[in-house]
Amino acid sequence: MLKFILALSIIFTTFLAHSQPITVSVLNELNDGVANVVVYLTPKDPKNKVASNKIAIMDQVNTQFLPHILAIQKDTQVRFPNSDSIKHHVYSFSQAKTFELQLYKELLADPLLFSKLGSVELGCNIHDWMLGYIFVVDTPYFGKTDIKGNLTIDLPDGEYQVHVWHPRIQDKFSSLSRQLILPKESELKILLGSPLLPDVNQYEALTDEFSDYE
C-alpha cells in the first residue's frame, strides 16, 4: 500500500512539474482589454489532445442567448433549454452546423452534436434581435477572456499555436495567431490592429409583440 501511495505521489508531482498557468491577454487598438474573446491553444504534440464527452448549455433568458458566445470542443453535445416563459424557435444556417429547433418551451429540445470546426451563428425566428454564437475548436485548451481581456489556463509543457476569435474582430484571425512555448513563457499579449465592429446585439423586445406564442 505504501508503494502504491508513493507511486501516485510521484505521478501527481510529475504532472504538476510539467504544467503551468499561462495568461493570454487580448487588447484593442487603445490598449484596453477585450472581454468575451474565445482563446484556444492547439498543441503541436497530438498526445496533448483529449477527446470531449461533455454536454454544454446554450440557454435562452430574457429573450437573449445565454451565454452570448459559447466555446466548445469538437464532438461536444449542446443542449438548448428555454428558461423564458415564451416559446423560441432556434435555428442556424452556418456551414459548421445547420439546424432548426421549432417552437418549444423549457427543456423539450434534444441535445445536438457539434462535430465541425468554426463559428455557428444562432438566431430565433420569433425574436429577430436574438443573436448568439457557438464556436467549435479542436483542442481541450480554450476559454474566454474576462472583463479585463485576460484568460488564464493551465497547460502541459510543450509548443502551442494560440488563436483568438470574436464576431466583432475585424483583423484577419490568421494575423493574430501566435506561437507559445512552455515552460519558457508564462504570458502572451495579442494586440488588435483595428477597432471592433459595432455591436449588433443591442435590441429591445416589444412588450406584448409575441404574446401569441406564450
Image (cartoon, grey):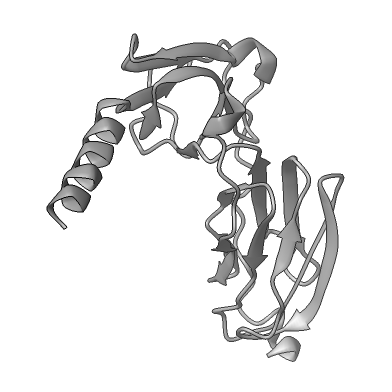
Name the spot of residue 182 as percent of width and height, x first. Answer: 38, 16
Residue 196, visible in the rendered structure = no
Q: Quadrant of residue 184?
A: top left
Looking at the image, residue 97 lies above or below residue 37: below
Q: Position of residue 116 (x, y in %)?
A: 78, 45
**Residue 110 in sight here:** yes
Q: Is residue 19 above or below residue 122?
A: above
Viewer-side residue, 181 vs 166:
181
Which residue reaches farthest left?
A: 2
Where does the C terminus fall, quadrant-wise? bottom right
**Along the line of sight, the residue nearer the viewer: 89 or 206:** 89
* Image coords of residue 25 (percent x, y): 39, 22
Q: Could you tell me how many numbered marks the image carries?
A: 0
Q: Answer with left or right where residue 187 lies relative to residue 78.
A: left
Above or below: residue 75 compared with residue 146: below
Does 126 sit left or right of 3 as displayed? right
Determine which quarter of the picture holds residue 60.
bottom right
Which residue lies at the image location 62% right of the left edge and 33% below the top edge?
A: 198
Residue depicted at x 81% and y 46% = 96
The x, y position of residue 114, in whole percent, is: 73, 55
Q: Quadrant of the N terminus?
A: bottom left
Residue depicted at x 68% and y 15%: 174
